[in-house]
Image: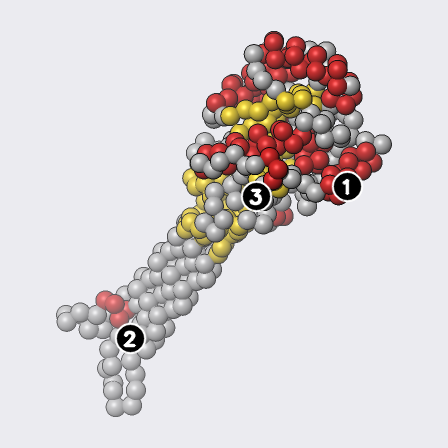
Amino acid sequence: MKFLDEAKIYLKSGDGGPGCVSFHREKFVEFGGPDGGNGGRGGDIIFEAIQDNNTLIDFRYKQHFRAQNGLHGMGRNRSGAGGEDLIIRVPVGTQILDEFKDEVLADLVEAGQRIVFLKGGDGGFGNAHYKTSTNQAPRKKTPGWPGQELPIWLRLKLIADIGLLGLPNAGKSTFLTAVSNARPKVADYPFTTLHPNLGVVRSYDKEFVVADIPGLIEGAHEGVGLGTRFLGHVERSAALLHLVDCTQDKPEEAYFTIRHELEAYGEGLADKAEIIALTKADALGMDLAEDQLKRFEDKTGMKAFLISSLSREGVEELLRSLFNHVYGSNGEEEPDNTAFIPLEDDDYANAHDTLEADLG
């Protein structure tokens, strides 16, 4: 399924049906009085958040949505039927913005959440509505009130427990492949990942969701490399996992580059809990990798994990830390180490084989 996180659509709720002018007629009743019914109410535009979808691609092929109009009133005091509501289903995490993207009109963050976004127009009155003691044969009716019409933008911000950050080719997709059933594209060149991916990590009989976004580059907070759109996908995360390639000469510079982009972007990203991991330890060998880790910690003043997604070195300890960041806020005790099984051995073996095949 292709990924799309922004789409412009056009909405119109239903118009109300017109009222009716009618007079009652039957045998021996020459002047039966007015009996024109009212028009039906137009249908509403309703948004509903659904769980089993994480893309707005459907809105690329259909941009115009219109609810049903109400029917006209009829004689014998029959009111017109109301128009059917139009329910538009969007992924959880979808924001509704105005035409100029200046204001967030609604934010759907829970599965099953519904909002009536545009109300349908009321139906018009028939002539029976206007009958009075002094006007017993009115010929007045009103048309239905028009529905509301509005162009809007839909913007999807993925809801994940952990957001993966790093420069291009830092090993984010490789890590996601190793710890979950997600299978993003993995290759030995920058910008392999072109759109966000979600993976579900299972540990301690519980699950949490990890979002892998494309690699960020300098100037991402200003939209360079679509950075602003990608950073939006980790805004809702409980914590950020910052991956740094330890095979480069100065990994601390890569770390400070991403930190600068987070602070410049705002939206509270720089204040989120952060876990740092140096990746690709197997490529250097553990002795050299540990030297890089020590230098990194000295230069940044931050503690970091040293991992290899291919050999699983350090992965379990890192997942343990992620688990505590996701569930620790619930007041739960740290799980017993013997119960820690992020994936079955067969799953790890399959993930390892897949990574080696992807990397050639």
Please give the name of the residue rendered at 43% of the width and 62% of the height, measured from the top-left corner: 83
16 or 82: nearer the eye? 82
Identify the mark nearer the N-term, 1 or 3: 3
Circle 2 residue: 35
Count of numbered labels shown in the rendering: 3
Q: Is residue 313 left or right of residue 46?
A: right
Residue 130, horizontal then vertical, whole percent: 23, 67
Tell whether 358 sits left or right of 299. right
Which one is earlier in the sequence, the residue at label 2 or at label 3? 2
Identify the secondary structure beneath mark 1. helix
Instruction: Mark 1: give few (<14), some (14-19) or many (20+) Cα within 10 Å.
Output: some
The residue under label 2 is which amino acid type?
Answer: Asp
Q: Are marks 2 and 3 in contact (CB under 8 Å)?
A: no
Identify the residue shown where x is 21% and y is 70%. Answer: 131
User: Residue at image x 42%, y 49%?
Assistant: 115
Specify whether 170 is left or right of 276: right
Across and down, in percent, residue 221 comes to 56, 21
| Mark 2 and mark 1 residues within 8 Å of each other at the beta carbon | no
Q: Secondary structure at mark 3?
A: strand
Question: For residue 350, which numbered disc appears in the image?
Answer: 1
Q: Residue beneath label 3, please?
A: 206
Up-down relation of residue 199 to residue 260 (above or below): below
